[in-house]
Amino acid sequence: MAASSSEYSRVTPELEALAQICRANNQINKDDYARFEVKRGLRDLDGTGVRAGLTEISEIVSFKNEDGQKVPCEGELYYRGYPVEELAGGFIKDSRFGFEETAYLLMFGQLPTKAQLRDFNAQLAFYRSLPTNFVRDVILKAPSQDMMNTLARCVLTMASYDEHTDDTSLANVIRQCIDLIAIFPLISVYAYQAYNHYKNGCSLYIHAPRPELSTAENILSLLRPDEKYTPLEAHILDLCLVLHAEHGGGNNSTFTTHVVTSSGTDTYSCMAAALASLKGPRHGGANIKVVQMLDDMQFSLPDWSDEDAIRDYLAGCLEGERFDHSGLIYGMGHAVYSISDPRAKLLKSFVGQLAEEKGMQKEFKLYSAVERLAPQVIAEKRKIYKGVSANVDFYSGFVYRMLGLPVELYTPIFAVARVAGWSAHRMEELINMGKIIRPAYIAVQPHRDYKSLAERG
């Protein structure tokens, strides 16, 4: 008889015993990392990433060289050599949507002409549909509370509908990448609708995408029962997509894209691997923690304008006494940026407008106070190697909350944006591919004498 779902998912005492054996036999002496000069996590002691490749797709600047010294500076982010602020300023000034233009720039290395952008949008609209019965047979029949797992499963399933899955010629990979950029929003929203219906008992809405709408507009239209949204809502979601579309080759999911591509595998496997990486709470789930932390703060503090109380709460977070007892203030600090995250600065400039439209000015003031006070509290409580500032996750979760996006979609929306960057890096790796990426590890396990099964007792 087949095991039930609850039986299948149960961690038994036997498994706990195996976990103890596994833990006991896999503890590596931390001092060995220094002794063998191993860059743990591919990082230097100051947290700087070990250089493992070259890219022309984007650049992150967090310090300047002055008289031979590395001096922290205001963070800068460039897409194909263009400052992200200027790119965003261009489409914001014209009141048009920028994600599709950004995806074109990242993938093909140049800003599109009007005709090229029109053709690219037409291709996205053409591919913005799923195979016949895919929603019914793949998404609705196996709803999951984890949209990222559903997204990865659907991406791998799409390989079954592609007659040229394993063709890694550049033109074919471009076709596959455009297809995935187009359908990621559909899969993500439909996966949530299935979960919300079958697990939460809510009405099921499966709207068809509209070819004349942008990616951001389609997300809001697909998600909402009445398919309605305001221009400000669509434009600020579009800005979020642009700011999350790419962030250098060194972040975990993009590096995964390079590693997996170097093996010569297909696009669907590559993107599924990147999704699995982004799903991790240390990478793609940070904005969820920010929202949950601020919710807890709002519940705990009777007066949201009391800065002494805010300081005490933040200090309690650092001391492991508040929120999730992790010792972290979520949304503060970044692996690269120190003085500022340019994405956070750009996003914040529009958050106030949305907060006013939604009547959430009080919440916005609290976020602003935390952004200002948290670095001071961290500097007082912790020994740090570089400055600490708000990162893009600090405000993106708040934006999604104001847009009414369910928390289950926060990380999938990240993936909807980042698949453009992953596509660009996959093509860059294919064009410049040399040997398979294969870092070295040093074995520290002593050699042992084999014992027969009878001798082991």
Image: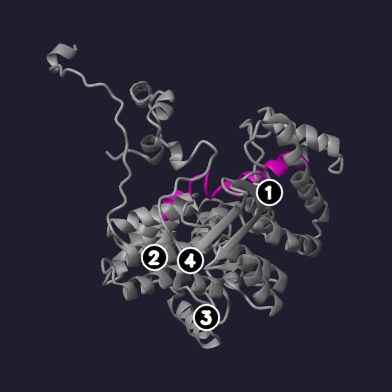
Q: Is residue 176 left or right of residue 292?
A: left
Q: In x, y percent, where is residue 356? A: 81, 62
Among the two numbered marks 4 and 3 on one chain, the one whose residue lies closer to the N terminus: 3
Residue 428: image quadrant is bottom left
Q: Confirm or deny contact between disc 1 and disc 2 (CB under 8 A).
A: no
Magenta stretch, main secondary structure, is helix
Among the two numbered marks 2 and 3 on one chain, the one whose residue lies closer to the N terminus: 3
Labels 4, 3: front one: 3
SS at badge 4: helix
Q: Is residue 346 above or below residue 284?
A: below
Q: Read off the residue under disc 2.
A: 428
Q: Read off the residue under disc 3.
A: 112
Q: Magenta stretch containing residue 280, yes or no?
A: yes
Distance from disc 2 to disc 4, alpha carbons, whole Å, reads: 13 Å
Distance from disc 2 to disc 3, alpha carbons, whole Å, reads: 18 Å
Question: Which residues make up the magenta segment?
Answer: 274-298
Q: In x, y percent, where is residue 187? A: 47, 63
SS at badge 3: loop
Split into 4 quadrants, where in the image is the C terminus? Answer: top left
Q: Residues within 10 Å of mark 1 (few under 14, many from 20)?
A: some
Split into 4 quadrants, where in the image is the N terminus? Answer: top left
Labels 1, 3: front one: 1
Which residue lies at the image location 43% right of the left edge and 60% below the top edge?
139
Residue extending furthest bottom? 115
Number of the label disc, if any, that sits on residue 339: 1
Q: In x, y percent, where is residue 28? A: 38, 25
Residue 153 in view? no
Query: How many numbered marks does the figure carry?
Result: 4
